[in-house]
Image (cartoon, coloured by chain):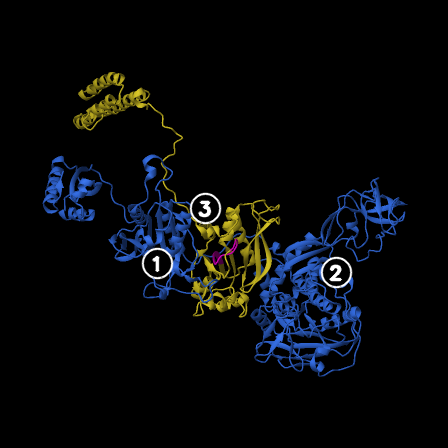
């Protein structure tokens, strides 16, 4: 909402500058969002005294004046105004002054008017934006000192834009703001005096409320013989000061009073109301109305309308009808000041997508009592600006005044809640300054009655807020942080995820973060899922992006492709994130997944041969092995598997402690073939639950060996299809005493070997005894035995 | 003087000569092997010590120790002299400007960095991390939090719904409700997590973002306690000069409600482009838990009181790292990610 400082000052004395005012408002919960100077005399306009007036040598209507502008400076100014007589004190815009006009900026320059030089401009009231008067120069007080800046004499207005929270509809008016300002600045707030003529004409038929549940109060009154026309300057100025457009005097008055008091008003053209009456009722199903903005709307019983004897004339609380409003021909009006049920107005406004100043106030709740004062105030102003005479008494139809909330309040409880020392007396003072009624004050508490404009006040906690707010949140003391813990950090899942994430990062991967809502294509790129397994939103932002990600693959592919298209070819990425499944037979509804992606050069920062090494299958496998080592996962294996996510023959399932943990391998060509990269892409998708579940901690200490180890190398040619694991298994079965470890140190295949269906392999066998140093002879004997069995049973050609 | 002492003296004289002559590493190593090695003189002598008569043992032991120390000194001296000889220097100094072989270093996402940091700060203040589902029901996300039935935030315009009536949580506050439902007070938790709003992605909005929310319920908890926690958080996150400012505000689930600002960490509150010349940066909302919320989870508001606060992690990350557009956080360009 916009506040005009000048307008606000009609109700409350503001004895501070704008910055202070804004600060006080913000700190009281009326958050100032923008401040803008409006109107006002531009800088550079000063008081000048005309010393001499001479006729222009070359013009009938222009004069050449010499003007004292203070500081010993006398300017020659050519002027066309009739009243530029010597002795007059007038505003003078000196050279360089910039005027803001609707047509744009206008700067005063040294100029020549019909051959005579002029060093400035003497101004009319209109030129200074102070009034519409342009008949001659503005004549100032002759006592004024030449050189005095004129903006100091006629301060401009300031428009302050504030954010009003939904619990405080009473702040949606100048008067409501003024009430709080008076409390903040410790001054008095005063309503304008409202005096209206008496009228005995009772029109019992004028107002009927049928929908009493939706309209607790409707005040109607008739004004006859008004002259609809332009509004007076003061009224236009007030409306324009907060960005409203002037329409005509009657409509402007209703808008003015709404902004002044917060009560929306409506003026009907009485003669357009069939039967010269209004009925507040629910619309009939299918009933139609054409609104002020020209829209035709089909209504139902959920909508509240103001109808005449025949049809709806206005959408209650939201917008008037096209044909019932005040026009230039209007002479008699029905002035509406009503209270409508806020939820109904909110629903209608939202359903039809119409938000007006009136609906904005109604849907937050208006003050039952204010309807009456606002009606009188509008009447007073209509009679003053549009003439006419009162045609009826105030026809006030209502269901009775609602009860005010009575709130018992304990001073100690409030102090303990806000943690601030505030005296009992100060609390009572705050309540009273906020126009709340305070009774039954004792040493421990009081009873507060909340007026009907403060529907937000219901409980003690609400009063605590008022005390905290007005006393100042900056007065809440600084205390030491205290509190009781309520559990152990070991329990929290965040710590475990955090630890896992840190381990993955320590392996050199970059963490990514993707949105959870994805496209069908992204979701189904993870072939573990079918359409029916996916969880779909009812109201996605766009129909294409409507599914919760079932896995992290789809978006990771998107990130890989995006990076590659930006020529970021060397990628080592991961994400740990929540994924969703609608099929309980496959996965729980929410779970965490880890996705890893590798592609490009392993060491792009290195040089020579090392630089050319690209990531391959074993990089990803090794990365997983390292992760398992970091995560204390010991019982795992990689099982050959095929899956549409991966290139056939280049994928494996990861099994941890007998459970499927996920898969990894080279990403399928259907994903990567179109990407502009020479490098293969490797992907792993793992269940975070399985990883965390298999982490049994670091285990117990093992004694360090006391005696040296002895090692022997064995090299051989093996059939190409013989796997490393088979050799290890075989060796294990041989049960060589004191064999500590077996380490593969070379695998070699050249064209010749490949043609022969063979590969060359070399292993180092390390022997160690815990109690003594092994002799060479012992070790030789064992390795010879092993060589014999390798040759005989595995058919290896030993070298 | 017994035989052992004589042997030691002879060996010392011999070793002096040999050490003076030893210039290369091999000769020095041989010296060590001969006298101190496993099969050298001194280990052998130590085995003979047992046969020394008791009255000579003290003197012999002293000579043995002194001799062994002297031999070690001779070896060390020879090593030091040989160190400066040509044999131990390289002919060509490595080009120090060539790049070293670096380990590939991983990078944490800026959102995670900030979330982890927030969690760490609050843990130091005794908060435990709590968690809850992202697919929530309307009760936990709205009803229990005292959100009016026709509150705009419940609109399909603003909240993602599923056909079964559940929603994607719009805030981390339902975690508070779930914890309070299942725990007796006191409760002291923070809940970091992903939340969802039906916003079209732009520079400051996304379909999802992250919040961290705190809750403390106990006897006699006051706004002063809330302020102290927020002030501590501000200084831990943004530096000791950062002050907080509370402003009254309105939220359905707290009363009194506040918004809190941090004094601008860039300009120290003097005004700069980061704080739009206000000296303060709006962070988020907080307040004293509304009595209605306490009643909804079965806590007696006459006995228990508490505060809750929340903030957006993306917002903190954008402030901290001066990231101008929220979308960069979800694009995952490696040139962006490697900066953190």
The C terminus of chain B: image quadrant: top left
Magenta stretch bounds: B202-214
Residue A545 rendering spot, x and y as whole percentages: 44, 61
The image shows a total of numbered marks equal to: 3
Q: Which residue is mark 2?
A: A237
| Mark 2 residue element | helix
Q: Is residue A729 visible?
A: yes
Asked if A383 appears above or below A565 in the picture, the reply is below
Separation of marks 2 and 3 at Cα, in angstroms: 53 Å
In the rendered image, residues at marks 2 and 1 fall on the same chain: yes
- Between tags 1 and 3, which lies in front? 1
- The chain coloured yellow in the image: B
Residue A611 rendering spot, x and y as whole percentages: 34, 38
| Mark 3 residue element | helix
* Chain letter of the residue beneath label 1 in the structure image: A
Asked if A60 appears above or below A311 in the picture, the reply is above
Along the line of sight, the residue nearer the viewer: B107 or B81 = B107
Q: Which mark is drawn over residue B336?
A: 3
Does A516 lie within the magenta span? no
Residue B196 rendering spot, x and y as whole percentages: 47, 60
Residue A171 rendering spot, x and y as whole percentages: 65, 64
Q: Is residue A446 visible?
A: no
**Apparent colour of chain A:** blue
Separation of marks 2 and 1 at Cα, in angstroms: 65 Å
Q: Which residue is mark 1?
A: A526
The quarter of the displayed image where residue B193 is located: bottom left
Along the line of sight, the residue nearer the viewer: A165 or A407 = A165
Along the line of sight, the residue nearer the viewer: B337 or B300 = B337
Separation of marks 1 and 3 at Cα, in angstroms: 27 Å
* Mark 2 neighbour class, 10 Å CA radius: few under 14, some 14 to 19, many 20 or more: some
């Amino acid at each position: 909402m916009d506040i005009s400082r000048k307008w606000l000052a009609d109700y409350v004395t503001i004895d501070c500058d704008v910055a202070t005012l804004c600060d006080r408002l913000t700190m009281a919960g009326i958050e100032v969002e923008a401040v803008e100077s409006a109107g006002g005399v531009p800088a550079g306009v000063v008081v000048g005294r005309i010393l001499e007036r001479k006729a222009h040598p070359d013009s009938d209507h222009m004069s050449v004046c010499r003007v004292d502008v203070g500081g010993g400076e006398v300017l020659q100014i050519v002027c066309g105004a009739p009243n530029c007589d010597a002795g007059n004190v007038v505003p003078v815009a000196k050279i360089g002054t910039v005027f803001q006009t609707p047509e744009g900026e206008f700067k005063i320059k040294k100029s020549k008017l019909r051959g005579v030089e002029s060093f400035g401009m003497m101004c009319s009231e209109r030129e200074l934006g102070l009034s519409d008067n342009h008949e001659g120069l503005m004549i100032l007080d002759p006592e004024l000192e030449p050189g005095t800046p004129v903006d100091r004499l006629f301060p401009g207005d300031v428009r302050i834009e504030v954010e009003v929270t939904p619990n405080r509809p009473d702040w949606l008016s100048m008067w409501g703001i003024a009430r709080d300002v008076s409390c903040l600045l410790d001054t008095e707030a005063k309503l304008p005096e409202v005096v209206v003529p008496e009228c005995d004409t009772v029109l019992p038929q004028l107002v009927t409320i049928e929908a009493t549940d939706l309209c607790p109060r409707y005040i109607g009154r008739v004004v006859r013989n008004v002259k609809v026309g332009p509004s007076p300057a003061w009224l236009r100025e007030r409306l324009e000061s907060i960005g409203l457009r002037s329409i005509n005097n009657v409509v402007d008055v209703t808008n003015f009073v709404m902004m002044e008091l917060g009560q929306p008003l409506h003026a009907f053209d009485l003669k357009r109301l069939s039967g010269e009456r209004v009925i507040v009722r629910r619309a009939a199903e299918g009933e139609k109305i054409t609104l002020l903005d020209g829209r035709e709307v089909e209504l139902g019983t959920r909508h509240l309308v103001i109808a005449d004897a025949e049809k709806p004339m206005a959408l209650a609380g939201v917008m008037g009808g096209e044909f019932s409003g005040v026009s230039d021909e209007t002479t008699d009006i029905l002035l509406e000041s009503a209270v409508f049920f806020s939820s109904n107005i909110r629903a209608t406004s939202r359903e039809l997508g119409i938000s007006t100043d009136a609906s904005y106030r109604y849907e937050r709740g208006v003050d039952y009592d204010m309807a009456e004062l606002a009606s009188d105030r509008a009447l007073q102003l209509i009679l003053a600006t549009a003439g006419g005479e009162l045609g009826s008494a105030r026809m006030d139809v209502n269901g009775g005044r609602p009860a005010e909330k009575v709130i018992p309040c304990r001073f100690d409880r409030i102090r303990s809640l806000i943690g601030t020392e505030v005296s009992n007396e100060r609390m009572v003072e705050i309540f009273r300054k906020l126009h709340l009624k305070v009774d039954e004050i004792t040493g421990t508490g009081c009873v507060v009655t909340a007026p009907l404009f403060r529907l937000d006040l219901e409980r003690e906690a609400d009063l605590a807020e008022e005390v905290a707010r007005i006393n100042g949140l900056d007065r809440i003391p600084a205390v030491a942080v205290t509190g009781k813990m309520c559990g152990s950090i070991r329990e929290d899942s965040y710590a475990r995820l955090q630890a896992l994430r840190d381990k993955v990062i320590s392996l050199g991967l970059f963490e990514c973060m993707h949105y959870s809502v994805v496209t069908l294509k992204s979701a189904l790129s993870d072939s573990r899922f079918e359409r029916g397994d996916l969880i779909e939103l009812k109201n996605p932002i766009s129909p294409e992006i409507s599914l919760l990600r079932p896995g992290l693959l789809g978006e990771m592919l998107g990130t890989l492709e995006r990076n590659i298209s930006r020529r970021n070819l060397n990628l080592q990425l991961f994400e740990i994130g929540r994924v969703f499944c609608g099929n309980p037979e496959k996965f729980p509804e929410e779970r965490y997944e880890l996705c890893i992606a590798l592609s490009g050069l392993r060491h792009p920062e290195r040089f020579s041969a090392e630089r050319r090494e690209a990531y391959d299958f074993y990089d990803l496998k090794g990365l997983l092995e390292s992760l398992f080592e970091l995560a204390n996962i010991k019982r795992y294996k990689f099982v050959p598997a095929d899956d549409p996510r991966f290139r056939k023959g280049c994928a494996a399932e990861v099994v941890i402690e007998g459970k499927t943990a996920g898969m990894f391998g080279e990403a399928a060509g259907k994903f990567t073939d179109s990407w502009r990269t020479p490098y293969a892409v490797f992907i792993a998708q793992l269940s975070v639950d399985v990883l965390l579940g298999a982490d049994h901690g670091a285990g117990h200490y093992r004694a360090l060996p006391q005696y040296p180890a002895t090692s022997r190398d064995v090299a051989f040619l093996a059939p190409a299809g013989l796997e490393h694991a088979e050799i290890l298994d075989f060796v294990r079965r041989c049960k060589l005493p004191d064999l500590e470890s077996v380490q593969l140190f070379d695998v070699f295949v050249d064209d010749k070997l490949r043609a022969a269906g063979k590969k060359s392999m070399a292993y180092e066998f390390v022997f160690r005894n815990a109690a003594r140093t092994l002799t060479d002879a012992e070790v030789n004997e064992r390795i010879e035995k092993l060589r014999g069995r390798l040759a005989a049973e595995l058919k290896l050609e030993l070298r | 003087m017994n035989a052992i002492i004589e042997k030691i003296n002879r060996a010392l004289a011999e070793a002096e000569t040999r050490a003076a002559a030893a210039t290369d590493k091999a000769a020095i190593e041989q010296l060590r092997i001969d006298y101190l090695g496993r099969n050298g003189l001194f280990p052998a002598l130590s085995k003979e010590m047992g046969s020394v008569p008791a009255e000579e043992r003290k003197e012999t032991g002293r000579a043995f120790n002194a001799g062994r120390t002297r031999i070690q000194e001779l070896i060390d001296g020879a090593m030091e002299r040989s160190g400066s000889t040509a044999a131990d220097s390289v002919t060509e100094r490595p080009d120090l400007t060539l790049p070293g072989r670096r380990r590939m270093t991983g990078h944490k996402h800026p959102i995670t960095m900030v979330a982890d940091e927030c969690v760490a700060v609050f843990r130091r203040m005794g908060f435990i991390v709590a968690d809850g589902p992202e697919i929530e029901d309307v009760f936990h996300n709205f009803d229990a939090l005292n959100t009016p039935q026709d509150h705009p935030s419940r609109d399909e315009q603003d909240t993602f719904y599923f056909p079964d009536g559940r929603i994607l949580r719009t805030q981390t506050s339902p975690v508070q409700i779930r914890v309070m439902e299942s725990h007796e007070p006191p409760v002291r938790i923070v809940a970091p997590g992903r939340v969802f709003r039906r916003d079209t992605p732009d520079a400051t909005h996304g379909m999802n973002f992250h919040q961290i929310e705190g809750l403390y319920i106990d006897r006699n908890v006051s706004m002063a306690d809330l302020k102290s926690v927020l002030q501590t958080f501000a200084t831990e996150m943004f530096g000791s000069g950062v002050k907080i400012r509370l402003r009254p505000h309105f939220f359905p689930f707290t009363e009194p409600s506040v918004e809190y600002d941090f004094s601008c960490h860039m300009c120290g509150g003097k005004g700069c482009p980061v704080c739009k010349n206000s000296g303060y940066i709006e962070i988020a909302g907080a307040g004293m838990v509304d009595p209605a919320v306490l009643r909804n989870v079965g806590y007696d508001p006459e006995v228990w009181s508490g505060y809750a606060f929340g903030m957006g992690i993306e917002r903190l990350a954008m402030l901290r790292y001066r990231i101008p557009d929220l979308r960069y956080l979800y694009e995952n360009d490696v040139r962006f990610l490697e900066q953190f």
